[in-house]
Amino acid sequence: MDTHDLLDSIDKGLDPFGSNYKQMIYWNLLATYRASSGEVIISDPEAFGRAIEELSGSRAERIEQSIIREVRKTFGLSIQESRNIVSTIQAAKEILVNYSPL
């Protein structure tokens, strides 16, 4: 398991909202932070959450829940570990830090 698995599960969580929406979120992160969306998501999950809220308005909670569901599935997170987008990404990162393949 690596950061690609985390980013892939986030991508899957965004899939139901369409490729245009997904690209809008990723472009916003790139333009705002001058770094790849993956770098921003991993290093600053709060910024990712803010981008979703700012660009999605009333749909933000549904979008975040979709992402959280996918990350939970991939990383086996509990509800307590993944109450919001930030805690979910942080819990997944913690798993990655402690992950050692056989």
Image (cartoon, grey):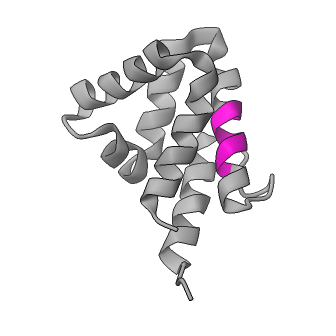
Q: Is residue 69 magenta?
A: yes
Tell me which segment is drawn in magenta.
65-71
Prevailing secondary structure class for the magenta stretch in the rendered image: helix
Q: Does the magenta stretch include residue 38?
A: no
Q: Is 52 or 102 nearer to us in this picture?
A: 102
Q: Is 68 or 101 nearer to us in this picture?
A: 101
Q: Where is residue 98 in the image (x, y as percent from the top left)?
A: 54, 79
Is 92 displayed left or right of 19 in the figure? Answer: right
Q: Position of residue 96 (x, y in %)?
A: 51, 69
Q: Where is residue 86 in the image (x, y as percent from the top left)?
A: 57, 46
The residue located at (72%, 42%) in the rendering is 69
Figure quadrant of the C terminus? bottom right
Q: In this view, does 59 lie above or below 9?
A: above
Furthest toward the right, the residue is: 79
Q: Position of residue 44 (x, y in %)?
A: 39, 47
Q: How many marks?
A: 0
Q: Is residue 7 above or below residue 76?
A: above
- Where, by quadrant of the figure, is residue 10 drawn? top right
